Amino acid sequence: EEVGGFGVLLAMGHEWSPLDKWQTSMELLANEVMPKVEDLKY
């Protein structure tokens, strides 16, 4: 049985300090999360 696809991922950030932690978080999102949801169709 299939479940509906994936449409939009919204990421918000309020605390951008320290910058290195924010950059690491965005890199993990881009390199680890996004490839895993790439094949989900909406």
Image: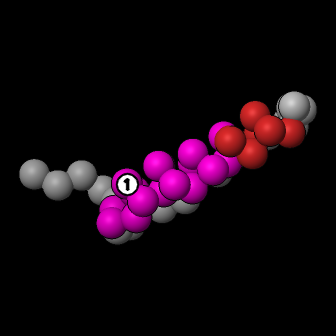
Whether residue 34 is in magenta: the answer is: yes
Numbered marks: total: 1
Nearest the viewer among 34 and 31 is 31
Q: In this view, does 24 lie above or below 9?
A: above
- Name the residue rendered at 75%, 45% in the picture: 23
Residue at the front extreme?
20
Nearest the viewer among 42 and 33 is 33
- Name the residue rendered at 33%, 66% in the picture: 39
- Colouring rule applied to residues: secondary structure
Give the image quarter of residue 13: top right
Q: Residue 35, percent across and down?
A: 42, 59
Q: Residue 12, percent across and down?
A: 75, 43
Residue stretch rendered in magenta on the structure:
25-40
Q: What element carries label 1?
A: helix
User: Does residue 1 appear anywhere in the picture?
Assistant: yes
Amino acid at dot 1? Lys
Q: Residue 25, percent across and down?
A: 66, 40
Main secondary-structure element of the magenta-colored stretch:
helix
Q: In this view, does 29 lie to the left or right of 21?
A: left
Q: In this view, does 12 lie to the left or right of 38?
A: right
Q: Residue 34, percent across and down?
A: 48, 56
- Name the residue rendered at 89%, 32% in the picture: 17
Circle 1 sits on which residue?
A: 36
Crowding at label 1, few (<14), some or many (≥20) Cα neighbours within 10 Å? few
Whether residue 20 is in magenta: the answer is: no
Q: Is residue 1 left or right of residue 24?
A: left
User: Does residue 12 appear anywhere in the picture?
Assistant: no
Q: Is residue 24 left or right of residue 16?
A: left
Quarter containing the C terminus: bottom left
Residue at the left extreme?
1
